[in-house]
Image: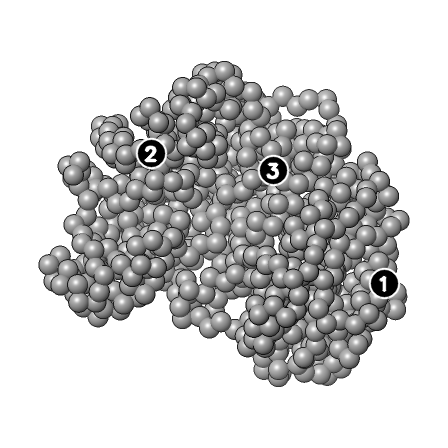
Amino acid sequence: SLGFEVPPSQIARSYLEGKEIAQNLGFPLVIRPSYTLGGSGGGFANNKEEFEKALKHGLLTSPIHEVLIEKSIYGWKEFELELLQDCAGNVIVVCSIENIDPMGIHTGDSITVAPAQTLPDTLYQRMRDQAIAVIRALGNFAGGCNIQFAVEPNTNQIAIIEVNPRVSRSSALASKATGYPIARIAALLAIGYRLDELPNQITRHTSAFFEPTLDYVVVKIPRWNFEKFPGADRRLGLQMKSVGEVMGIGRSFAEALQKACQSLEIRRNGLGADGREVKNLHRLQERLSAPNSDRIFYIHDALLLGMPISTIHKLTQIDPWFLYQIQAICEMEKYIASFSSLEHLPKEVLHQAKRMGFADRQIAHLLHCLESEVYQKRKSLGIQRVYKMVDTCAAEFQAQTPYYYSTFEQENENIPSSNPKVIILGSGPNRIGQGIEFDYCCVHGVIAAKEAGFETIMINCNPETVSTDFDIANKLFFEPVFWEHVYEVIEQEKPIGVIVQLGGQTALKLAEKLHRWKVPLLGTSFDSIDLAEDRGRFSQFLQELGIPYPRFGVAYSAAQALQVVEQIGFPALVRPSYVLGGQKMRIVLNQQELEEQVIKVLQELPGNAVLIDAFLAGATEAEADAICDGENVHILGIMEHIEPAGIHSGDSTAVLPPFSLSKEVLEQITDYTTQIALNLQVKGLINVQFVIQEQKVYVIEANPRASRTVPFIAKAHQVPYVNIATKIMLGTHKLSDFVIKPQQKGYAIKLPIFSFDKFPKVNKELGPEMKSTGEEIRFIENLEDEFFVNLYRQRNIYLSR
């Protein structure tokens, strides 16, 4: 009705209607179910067979059994505008976002960049005019709105694909990209404030009726977890499959892209230059033509081999501008490698590489030297990071909020204070095994450190989290939780110490290097962390304390693994040290499975010790969380798992307090938890996991850090456990300073949430490797509750390997 173009489409509420519409519109088609999120139930259809399958699936997925069938514009360029409107009809565009991936991939699975890079101003103004007309036509609407556009790359024809009159996943990204708090302002607009009445939170002098200006580039890359779902279709399309995302900020697209790649925690040091390049041309052509989670790395590899940009553009439909940017990274990579050694690398080349986002580790790989040598060389040449402020206004007005990103220029906008400071390492991207629960711990840790009188500094790269809000910590460094970036913030800020216990495995993995570089760790020492993480050392530790544990052995090869199994027998549990979320853990039943699994682990995690445990089939599993101050231990809670041992604790349904464990068993759990915490000299949080067989309790592992279940117990008991633990880590308080009074009545149940519907070909078996993507809490008064009874009946169904 506004006269704007949309892809031709019609609504179908039945199979018959759908088929008629398909005849009228012609292939290719897109099917979009009504009232679903994350593209659930959506699909492409290029022929009759694909259409019938997609139509049936779409009608079933939609809660009102209705689908939109529209003409496909696969391969067009995709853009989004984030807008705000108030009750007086004032509208601002907060941010423009460009999808590097073309139309056809869900925006949550697309690599995106802000501000839009390849959008001519004339086209942007047309888009802006259309977006404002649309938001005004929505009627009595005040708040945030996200509008998605498709642009035909040859004719610049614009079509509006989608309007979300609410804050969206992109709103969170736009907020972190610009520093403009969209959700906060949208809430105030919803209750009647006007944009011109509200202040800009970052400058505190200007009005919120002001469009942010960016003097930097932001790149968002989604984080996938396909390795947890063997047999899953890794191709990307209309249904979102990513479980998290990261954001990199730089002065150029190349720098922001490399920083985002460093943030992903997929054992890459940036975009390439790490020895993991694919060099098979046929395989690259295959991988480039079908959108998938590693496509950005395949583009780099193809350019490095010399594949023409025109060929890559034809295979991927990605705008050539982005391909030229990646080619510039490849050219720099080749140029660095052309020097015979680090000594011969000129200062200007090193400086230019750092400005393009190359990590010291990448440069070291190309020049066959150590990361620390590259670091020392650039320090001696005066090439070091400076920190720029995210200020919403390209430094036109002075910002009052310390929100920083790093780059390699002359002027440093970060002025460290002389206050005693604490750095808290964030938890990086959400993924299976490490989700929002660790961000909860980080945020509560920041609040506690502030209350204890410290200046707090947060380092994190996840735009979806509260820890990266600019008003949580005293200073936010939006940087990869990656050694080089972390160490340079430490050098600049000189904190009294770093907290690694709250950010899950992301933060904990940096403990060893921090210890080596003599950076003080607050709370539990590195040696205690290492003792608990190194499964072999930990079992020896339990032996000395006389605490039972399943029989085990350590192997560094498949031959050693066979010797271990001769002693302990099958079934056996194979697991590497230093992992989270049960990564690469498997129950093996025979020699062949054992050999295959050990070889697989050692291939993917070279140098890692493999622990082989006797698997106690049919045993009950339980876990306890505790706080220790070095002298006393307070057990937060003991949880009993409904499912039998063998299912990862993150995939288990846990009940607090236990529902069937005897008094003797609970006493053993309490005693072992207390002994382990005191003898490990824990200062802060610890999680201990147990299996119980015939009234005997065995310890299977201890994690001297915040665990996934700490927020669950804190919410069930209404006690700020993370606040208490952080003050103990800081050394300002002892357990005796707190009065802890849990408020729980009845039972609390922690229920895992799975995303199996996104991976239809994957079976729902559960085992020692975690697969859940979230959780919920449910309260019941007693064990007669029908909900609990049904859960208990189904406890064995999904147990697998």
Residue 318 location (% of width, % of height)? 30, 46
Q: Is residue 550 visible?
A: yes
Residue pointed to by mark 3: 459
User: Which of the two labelled residues, at mark 3 and mark 1, occupies the earlier sequence position?
Assistant: 3
Q: Is residue 543 above or below residue 176?
A: below
- Label 2 packing within 10 angstroms: few (<14), some (14-19), many (20+): many
Which amino acid type is shown beneath numbered disc 3? Ile
CB-based contact (under 8 Å), mark 3 and mark 1? no
Mark seen at residue 212: none
Picture residue at 78% right of the left edge, 63% below the top: 538
Mark seen at residue 141: 2
Numbered disc in front, either 1 or 2 = 2
| Residue 686, quarter of the rendered image | bottom right
- Label 3 packing within 10 angstroms: few (<14), some (14-19), many (20+): many
Residue pointed to by mark 1: 671
Which amino acid type is shown beneath numbered disc 2? Phe
Q: What's the CA distance linking mark 1 and mark 2?
A: 59 Å
Residue 728 location (% of width, % of height)? 79, 42
Q: Nearer the viewer, residue 439 or 477?
A: 439
| Residue 292, quarter of the rendered image | bottom left
Question: Residue most toward the left?
Answer: 24
Picture residue at 66% right of the left edge, 41% below the top: 444
Q: Is residue 518 visible?
A: no
Image quadrant in which the C terminus is located: bottom right
Q: What's the CA distance linking mark 3 and mark 2?
A: 37 Å
Numbered disc in front, either 3 or 1 = 1
